Every structure is written in C-alpha cells, then in structure tokens.
Image (cartoon, grey):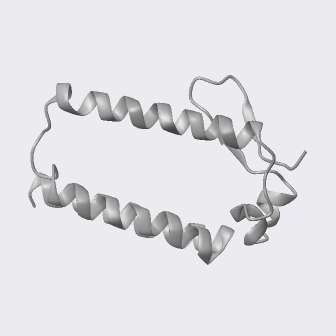
Amino acid sequence: MSERNLSVAAAVAFAVVAMVAGCRAIGLPPVVIVGGSSAIGLVMWLRTTGGRAVDPDLILPPFLLTVAALETHMAEEYLTPRPAAHPAGRFQRPWAAAAGARTSCPGWSRTISTRPR
C-alpha cells in the first residue's frame, strides 16, 4: 500500500469514527456540518496537494491567516452575546446550553465557556 493510500485510509477512518461518535454524543445536525466539511476538505486535499509536498513559503501565509481568522472568530464568540439562532440553541443540546460548551484556544491561558450571560 502506498503512502498516499495509507494517508487517505487514515483520514477516512478518522472522519467516520469521529462522525459516528459525534452523532451519538451531540446529535446529527452538528455532525452533518462538521462531517460534511471534513469530506469536502479530504476531496480538495486529494485534488490539490494530496500526492506531493507544498513549498512551505507558499503555504505558510494562508495558514497563518487561517489561524488568525479562527482566533478572531473564537474571541468574537466569547465577547458577544449568543443570539437565539446560535447552533447551540437551535439544536437544543444540553451540553451547549446548560453545561457550557468549552473551547480550548491556543495562545489563551483559560477555557472559554459559551454559556449565555
């Protein structure tokens, strides 16, 4: 088995196991969103750089912009009140509404709770 086929098999296995575990723990709607994203990401990876290495000088700027956008998004989620249309309220998940969904943010020294204030 080639290294690429092994990587694809590992990625598919991880995505399937994570989606099944997530479906049992948090329900179908959030899993469809995350699982669909992982499937699209896998297909795009296979069509673009799945078989060859990318020059680090080309990939580093978009990667850093993505990390910065994620950090900005997590800060925005933490600092602004959660609207009624937020997925945690829409899917009525007790882990998100009552217990408070927690996200560990790289670079931040604490855990963020998304409980309504």
Q: Residue furthest right?
A: 117
Q: Is residue 65 above or below residue 73?
A: above
For the residue pair 57 and 82, the one nearer the viewer reads as 82
Left or right of residue 33: residue 38: left
**Which residue is depicted at the point 42% across and 63% down?**
37
- 59 sits left or right of 107 in the view: left
Spot occupied by residue 75 in the image (x, y as percentages of width and height): 66, 34
**Residue lying at 78% horizontally and 60% vertically, measured from the top left:** 95
Displayed quadrant of residue 103: top right
Quadrant housing residue 27: bottom right
Residue at 77% across / 41% down in the picture? 80
Residue 59, x across and y down, in percent = 23, 33
Residue drawn at the location 60% of the way across and 77% of the way down: 28
- Residue in front for this viewpoint, 92 or 26: 92
Q: Nearer the viewer, residue 14 or 56?
A: 56
Which x, y percent locates residue 73? 59, 40
Tally of numbered discs: 0
Quadrant of image for the C terminus: top right
Query: Where residue 53 sits in the image (x, y, percent)?
Result: 12, 39
Asked if residue 57 is positioned above or below residue 113 in the image, the reply reads: above
* Left or right of residue 91, residue 2 in this image: left
Quarter of the rendering occupied by the N terminus: bottom left
Residue 58 found in image quarter? top left
